[in-house]
Image (cartoon, rainbow, N blue to C red):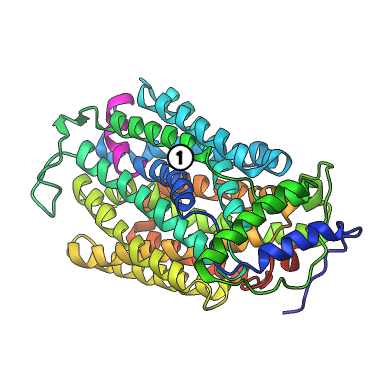
Amino acid sequence: MASETSGISQPAASSGAAIIARQDRIPVWSFPYLFLVIIGIGTLFTFYDISDINVSFIQTCTQIVAGCTPASAAGYIGPPTLLNLIGYIVGALVLAPFADRFGRRNMLLITLLLTGIGSIYTAFVGDYVNFIIARTITGIGIGADLAIVNTYISEVAPVGARGRYISLNFIVGGVIGSLLGIWLALVLTTPAAPFPAGLPFAVATVAGPVFEGPGWRIIYGIGAALAIIGVLLRFELPESPRWLVSVGRLEEADRTITKMEQRASVRIGELPPPPPALPVTTSVERVGYGEILGNPLYLRRVLIVLVLWLLVYAATYSIVSGGTVIMVALGYEPPVAGLLVAIGALGQIPGGYLATAFAERIERQIWMLIAAIITLLGGIITAAGGHSSFIVALIGIFLIWVGIAIFIPISYAWSTENFPTRARAVGFALGDGVGHIGGGIAVLVVTLIIGSLGAWGFFILLGAYYLVASGVARLGTITRNRRLDEVSP
């Protein structure tokens, strides 16, 4: 693919470029590994919140919406999901730019605090309107947090391992968080039933159409606790040295890089010499959206990233947030649908492992195609299994989650690499953040037409979203094993 140029003039002083070159020579993770856990706890909450509504919403709906039944819950999950994801967009577009202005670490504290407030509000709502409002507030925090977390990891990870560490964060936080949210909901919000019709130790009770019990409130309360823990731990994170250079705070960046070099030297001995210094634009002026929308190179990139995420989230949220109620609408009993989603979600473990262990072996776009094929295959198997074979349907759902766990972190890495340090959070917010509307619209529309789609139509549609998204990514730039200031000057 032909190389790209951005037309940026007036590069930074050589001292800033030299500092970044020193960081780029470090071939290993050079912060304490505890920092990966700290970042991962925030990501854990994010994916816990994304997933906890999946199984628990049937209980929530029957308690706070007059006339809601398990079979009709699919008609009510669309609005809170859509508004939650609109909150993502608002948070990403309004809050993420402050990370380019005031720093990654400071905004990571604010965004996670906001998600915690939204989660505890959700735990105490008494009606459907307040549930939607609470989900919207939570979404505002999560949308910004996703943009800034992935920006931060991309900027501090080694040149040849950005995909690996973003995928590792997905395993540490995303996989554990989503599994925790789904399984807690299965135990706390569904009635007991002999396996595979449900879980024998589930604790919800049924009184007519209502799934009784406080389980869904407990789940959101746990989410608030996770957010508080994450905020306290994030005080330990250092600021991104790339961001420090981008705003002219060279002495602070130099001190951070020196500590990184010292830790790396303890691990591997003598470090390689710095690569040639690349021009690094340093400015104390505000750049924000003008840097992306006013630059033809980055405008083209953000449009490609946006279309990719519109398609990816249309598929992802149909399963991650709406999977259980959609499968109930397809004729599965609620405990069976919840069990299929909960066990199938374990597919994130091998999927996340593959993304982490082999992320840097092949280009990002090839990984996306592989993930799309796996997802489509899983959908075909699930539709073929239908209600007649729990095992066949489970294998299909498992493969869908494998595909999701490969596609998402690889796409996160690629999206952050497409934009310059001075506007990386903004670029990611415009692409990934706005792209969440695809998920909200898809869940809203699919739940309305699921009867017409049927199982075959629904599951093939999921795979088709990913296939088209992987094709869109082919229109973009190659980023693997390239320095960030080379890819996005």
**Residue ID at (40%, 71%):** 374
Viewer-closest of 103 and 362: 103
Residue 230 at least partly seen: yes
Instruction: Tell me the residue that label 1 is attached to.
Output: 81
- Please, is residue 458 above or below residue 473 in the view? above
Provide the secondary structure element on which disc 1 rests.
helix
Q: Which stretch did the figure color magenta?
A: 53-64
Q: Residue 134: give x, y in percent of width and height.
A: 46, 28
Quadrant position of residue 461: bottom left
Is residue 224 rendered to the left or right of residue 412? left
Q: Residue 287 at x, y = what percent? A: 81, 45
- For image coordinates 81% across by 41% down, the residue present is 286
Number of numbered discs: 1
391 vs 130, left or right, is left
Does residue 61 show up magenta in the picture? yes
The amino acid beneath tag 1 is Thr
Q: Residue 357 placed where, x, y %?
A: 43, 71
Q: The C terminus is located in which quarter?
A: bottom right
Residue 79 seen anywhere in this rendered image of the structure: no
